[in-house]
Image (cartoon, rainbow, N blue to C red):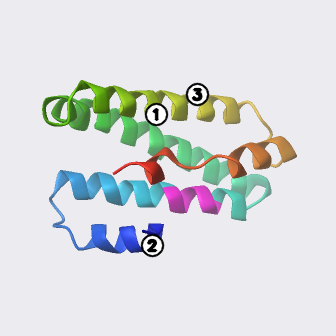
Amino acid sequence: MSDSERDSEYAALPDDDVVAIVLRQHADIREMMVRVLEHDGSRRQKSFAELKGFITAHEKAEQAVIRPATRGTAGPDVTDARLREEAQAEQLIAHLEHLDVNGDTFIATRSSTSSPSSRRQ
């Protein structure tokens, strides 16, 4: 299933459904990642800062609300796998923060990675 097909399915979920909110935010993160690379100069820096802030808030909410529920329903193995993915995403963001957003290394690093949110549901 493509990201756009998945995003269409998520859009059909009720607005107050916490899972729908999280999945929509994953779609938002994918869109923001594209926008970062579409811009250059100070616009890329601003887009990256917005992405970083959004991901930080999203991950804190997932850890506070979703992970405890996941541990009880999906079990510790699934929960631990998601926590590892989140830690990897945090490490990638920390690495990207130290690069010039307009430099080749930033673009190559970002282009060679996929969004953790595109791999999970």
Q: In terms of sequence position, does the residue under pointer 1 or pointer 3 come before the other?
A: 1
The dot on residue 4 is 2
Label annotation for residue 116: none
Horizontal side of residue 79 vs 92, given as left or right: left
Looking at the picture, tell me which residue is in the foreground, 20 or 77: 77
| Circles 1, 2 touching at the beta carbon (< 8 Å) | no
Return the disc, 3 or 2, that comes first in the chain's sequence: 2
Tag 2: amino acid: Ser
Residue at 42% across, 68% down: 1
Q: Is residue 33 magenta?
A: yes
Q: Residue at x 86, y 47 (%)?
A: 104
Kindly report the distance in space between the C-alpha atoms of the residues bearing marks 3 and 2.
27 Å
Give the dominant element type of the magenta stretch: helix, strand or loop.
helix
Range shown magenta: 30-35
Looking at the rendering, which quadrant does residue 16 occupy? bottom left
Amino acid at the residue labelled 1: Glu
Q: Is residue 44 above or below residue 100?
A: below
The residue labelled by disc 3 is 91
Residue occupying image coordinates x 63% and y 48%: 48
**Disc sitting over residue 85 in the figure:** 1
Mark 2 surroundings: few (<14), some (14-19) or many (≥20) residues within 10 A: few
- Determine the CA span between mark 1 and mark 2: 22 Å
User: In the image, 39: left or right of 94?
Assistant: right
User: Position of 113 compared to 87: left or right?
Assistant: right
- Which sits earlier in the primary sequence, circle 1 or circle 2? 2
Identify the amino acid type marked 3.
Gln
- Determine the secondary structure under disc 1: helix
